[in-house]
Structure formats: structure tokens, C-alpha cells
Image: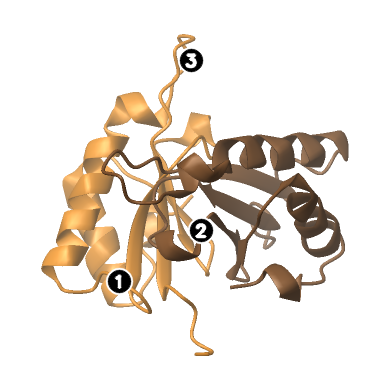
Chain colours: A orange, B brown
Amino acid sequence: MSDKPYFEKHVFFCVNQRDDGRSSCGERGALAAQKHAKGRIKQLGLNGHEKIRINQAGCLDRCEEGPVLVVYPEGVWYTYVDHSDIDEIVDSHLVGGKVVDRLKI
Amino acid sequence: MSDKPYFEKHVFFCVNQRDDGRSSCGERGALAAQKHAKGRIKQLGLNGHEKIRINQAGCLDRCEEGPVLVVYPEGVWYTYVDHSDIDEIVDSHLVGGKVVDRLKI
């Protein structure tokens, strides 16, 4: 068995949608952002085993700071506003290994 | 800001349910297993910031080995059959820090 992690970078987007009037990642474009990131990684040929996986997740319990995502195994958390923020996280962090300080939470 | 990870252990259960006839974690009790683990962690008072978070996730792309979960930041993957397997993962790994080799994938 390989000693490498199953995914080199495993990214989880909170896509939780609240129905109780409280703010949630889901109503701030999280699902579209996740699909955008997933598509971009696929386009770059970086998806799959020992590479990068872009996942949806339930509530990550940082609602007030949202929309949020987390990159494992390093455990770096980000917020984002639009797809250009997502592109920066993909290009700088996921592909280049350099954390995007301005979006880090 | 604390240097500690936001969650000491962040657990993701694949709860994906396929509609195309292919086998999926969701149809093998994943949601009930996730709720069981989450309840147990809460009962132990171990849920929350700098402690343990039990999340639902979309397809983790290891369908054939499912149902699966992954524990970060260590990136240890498990399969399970029933709630006693979940209890063993909670007690041994999440609480005690000892990987459950027999369930590891």
C-alpha cells in the first residue's frame, strides 16, 4: 500500500442551506463555487487518487465566517466572495502549495 | 489566533446516495452512522471548536470500499458495518488516539 495520502489535497466546501433564517454558506453561492473549483481541477487534470478531491460537506460550524471551505490534510480554512477568489485558492494553494493569506480565516 | 487546528479531529462520512443502481455509502446506512457518531461525541462533551467535528460529505470517491469515512488531519480512512464499529472508531481513534487497524482501508 502507498504511504501517500489517498488524496494529496482534500477540499471540503460547506454547502449547508439553513431554513431557519440564519445565514448559511449554501445561500451565499457555496454550491456554485464548489462546482466551479471541481471543474477547474478536472480541467487541469489534477482530480483523482493521490491528487486533488473537491467535496461538498454539511455545516462546518463556522457559519458567521462563511462561506467557508477547508483544505486537508493541512487544515487551512478559507472564506471567499466570488469565483476569482476560488481560482486564486486553486492556483496558489492547491496547485502551487502557497497559502492565500488574504482569504484565510 | 490559536495555532491549534480549528478542529482537533475532523471526520467526514460519505453519505452520498446514488440513483443509478451503483452501490453507494448512502444506501449502506451512512447517514444513520454519521448521526450515531455525532450523538456519541456530543454525549461525551467532545464536540466543538478545538475538539471534534463529525460531518456529512458528498461522494468521497471510494464507493467500492464503502461505506467510508475519513479522519483529518491525519487522513485515516475507515469502512464500517454497524454502529459497534462506529463506537470502536470513536472510542479508540477519536477519543484515545489509537487507529483501528481492522477497519482501516
Q: Chain of mark 3?
A: A
Residue A95 vertical placement versus B24 (above, below): below
Residue A10 versus residue B55 in the image, above or below? below
Tell me the chain of label 1: A
Please tell me if label 2 and label 1 are on a single chain: no
Q: Secondary structure at mark 1?
A: loop
Q: Are callouts 1 and 3 both on one chain? A: yes
Q: Quarter-wise, where is residue B5 in the image?
A: bottom right
Q: CA distance from mark 2 to mark 1?
A: 17 Å
Crowding at dot 2, Cα within 10 Å, few <14 / some 14-19 / many 20+, comes out as many
For badge 1, the amino acid type reads: Gly
Question: Is the residue at mark 2 from the same chain as the one at mark 3?
Answer: no
Residue most extreme to the bottom: A2
At label 1, counting other C-alpha atoms closer than 10 Å, the crowd grade (few under 14, some 14-19, many 20 or more) is some
Identify which amino acid the numbered label 2 is placed on: Gly
Q: Give the side of residue A99 with respect to residue A36, left or right.
A: right
Q: Nearer the viewer, residue A10 or A65?
A: A10
As drawn, the label of residue A69 is none
Seen at 88% across and 40% down, the residue is B44
The residue singled out by tag 2 in the image is B66
Closest to the observer, A35 or B27: B27
Disc 1 designates what residue? A48
Q: Earlier in the sequence, mark 1 or mark 3?
A: 3
**According to the image, label 3 marks what residue?**
A22
Q: CA distance from mark 1 to mark 3?
A: 35 Å
Question: Dot 2 lies on which element?
Answer: loop
Q: Position of residue B102 (x, y in %)?
A: 73, 73
Residue, far front:
B21
